[in-house]
Amino acid sequence: MRAKTFRTWLQHLQSEGRLAVINRNVSLQYEIAAVSKKLDGKKATYFTNVEDYSIPVVSGICSSREDFAEALETDQFGIIHKFNEAVASPTPCRLVNDAEAPVKENIILGDIDLMKLLPIPVHHEKDSGNYITAGLFIVRDPETRKQNVAIHRLQVSGKDKLGVLLLPRHTFHLFKEAEEAGRALECAIAIGVDPVTLLASQASTPYGVDELEIAGSLRGEPLEVVRCETVDIDVPASAEIVLEGRILPHVREPEGPFGEFPKYYGPRSNKEVVQISAVTHRNNPIFYTIVPACYEHFLLGGIPREASLFQSIRQTVPGVKAVHMSPGGTCRYHAIVSIKKRTQGEAKNAIIAAFANSFDIKHVIVVDEEIDIFNMEEVEWVIATRFQAQKDLVLIHDSQGSKLDPSTEDGVGSKMGLDCTVPLNSEPMRYLPVYIPGYNEVKTEDYVDFKASIKAEHLE
């Protein structure tokens, strides 16, 4: 498979001409982020010459839906179904020994200085420092032995310390249990994994599901993992770099501001602290960073949310065909839903189900099944021609939303749904789109003479 490891995926991108190799000397301070953002959605970036470091930096390895579809060996319409099948049937990982794990080729214990070891960038002007943005943060439930995987922003706050933003989800739950018992929570941070495992880490699952097992199902084979050196955590054996550590109980230190997915800064506040106890890495490791608020960041969060959203809506509206969290809505706030409408009112039910799925969702647009929900021009067209606010608008005020949305009052705001479906009792010609017979079969290269020019007398 093309995406078996981080390196096989880079080889594939290079073979397809989708990897930009930058040999010019670049700084960690904004320059890597700036160049990567310039090529966002076009090519991945591979920086071979990072100032003061021998380790290269990569960004943008999956910055389009087509990239993720290719890594999953499907098309963009099959991503959600394949993802939901994997979530429903996880595949247990295969534990390998150190000799079989490339990430154990180098083991560093004791005196650790993260900024001397790794080229960790500063991304945005007001960011509070150097941030790890693409590390799989792995913790284990000591009772069930199940692991949880997520991606948290990690600020370098000392030689061997990271400030971590823990939202009130599964990692936070495990940490609070440990903290209440007066102990640290062991963790590991895997940097540079294949895009399939990266995507699996963002799955919306019930508590107790190991996202690395979802990665195995997406890959069609068990993911190989290896036990860490200083903590009881299993990590992807082919990762480029792994940081081992513990989230310290009853310790909070300033973290932030940090440029987040809404293209605004998350504020500075006191956050939990990770103490690093070991670093392991492959020979000639590659550091991977995600530039926040770029397509890679949006899609990585958006695609798993689409999978969860599809399942939620299907329970209420069985005729749902597809869902799309659009990049314009940062793949968090805007949902476009395609349905095969069988009864009046179903579109509004779909809107309500979407809001119930995630408090982040702010605007929902429901369209008929023939509309390409990935084509925003088509979506805008149905808003323009099939929507009337008096009867097709759903408004909900004073509801919980995203605290990172600056237009809310501490996360509380309004939500809006637009029913852009055709009324079932409409006259047949009223909403019939215009169509040119034979249009889809026409190939312009069969008609256009690209060497021809207009005769001179016709231009006088």
Image (tube, rainbow, N blue to C red):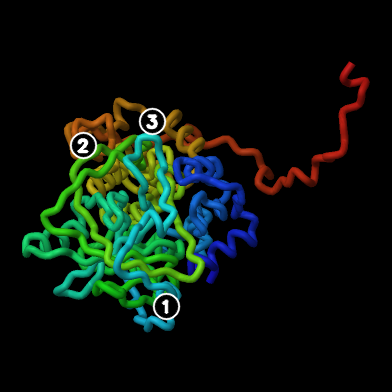
Residue 297 relative to residue 110: left or right: right
Q: Is residue 267 above or below residue 174?
A: above
Q: What residue is disc 3 on?
A: 387
Contact, CB < 8 Å: mark 3 with mark 1? no
Q: Mark 3 and mark 1: span between their CA atoms?
A: 56 Å
Which one is nearer the viewer's eye here, 165 or 454?
A: 165
Element type at mark 3: loop
What quarter of the picture does the C terminus occupy? top right
Whether residue 372 is visible here, answered yes or no, is no
Horizontal and vertical percent position of residue 371: 48, 43
Q: How many residues crowd mark 3 within 10 Å: few (<14), some (14–19), many (20+)? A: some
Residue 262, located in which quarter of the rendered image? top left
Horizontal and vertical percent position of residue 50: 52, 51
Q: What residue is disc 1 on?
A: 101
Element type at mark 1: loop
| Of callouts 3 and 2, the N-terminal one | 3
